Image (spheres, rainbow, N blue to C red):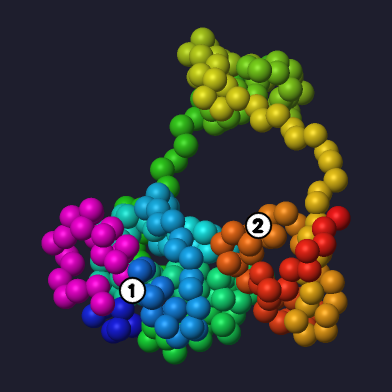
Amino acid sequence: MAQGARASGTTTDSLSDDALRQRVRTLVEERLTQAERHFGRRIPRPEIRFDLTGKTAGQAERGGAFVRFNTVLLRENPEDFLARTVPHEVAHVVVARVYGPATRPHGREWKAVMRDLYGADPSRCHQYDVTNAARRTQARYPLACGCMTHHVTARLVAQVVQNPGSRICRKCREPLAPADAATREVGKAYSKRRPARKKKAAGRQRRFAYACPGCGQDLWLSTTRHNRIQRDGTRYQSGCCRAPFGTEAFTGRQA
């Protein structure tokens, strides 16, 4: 843990949010470079985002494509955040790139990277005070039926406005409807911002054949996983032998 603190600097309490974010970016780069030297291979850089809210301090995409950080918790706990949270998420990226995204999120590979490579505490959860970072309560709007008024989210209001009669009261079994003109306008506005998604036409998914390095068995992967391997250098583990494989295992066959 001290190793992460040294890399991030000495005093962070007086830094602005922009300066703290830059510290995070710098530390992510340092930790990834350190992992590259350790494993002897290139690790593609993830996108770094600071859009995480609520009680979660950090989050890494399962395949290592991006990491997200909570600016509020970074601001309130800068030293510990840089020493523990940043290495925690970077370790997820390293494990996904080296061992494959099918590896357990907090398994022995992740713990080894945290403890042996970064010298950080391999604990799963933080102990930060999340009072100021807690999610805001969603606004509620009135829907009326035959017996009472229901206060619901804008999403549900939009459903009722778009499809009258689609929602009914559990008590009186009467359909729900906007209680006033203002609520109806909320539903219309929400529908314009987030139009209903069109369902994709069902079709046969293409599969790509890889050979297990351990036993030679064919491993048929989806287009998504195939692209991650070929484009991003992601490595997976075979389900039969738990052997890591990547681009070198592609047989060239597809179905």
Amino acid tagged 2: Asn
State the residue in front, 114 or 220: 220
- Main secondary structure type of the part rendered in magenta: helix
Type of the residue with mark 1: Glu
Q: Is residue 153 magenta?
A: no
Q: Quadrant of residue 213?
A: bottom right
User: Which residue is at the far front?
Assistant: 252
Residue 121 appears anywhere in the view: no
Give above or below for 47 relative to 28.
above
Q: Depth check: give the residue in front, 120 or 141.
A: 120
- Cα gap from disc 2 to disc 1, whole angstroms: 27 Å
User: Where in the figure is residue 123, as x and y percent of width and height?
Assistant: 46, 79
Crowding at label 2, few (<14), some or many (≥20) Cα neighbours within 10 Å? some
Q: Earlier in the sequence, mark 2 or mark 1?
A: 1
Horizontal side, residue 121 vs residue 8: left or right? right
Which residue position holds label 2?
227
Q: Residue at x 56, y 82 (%)?
A: 109
Tag 1 residue: 30
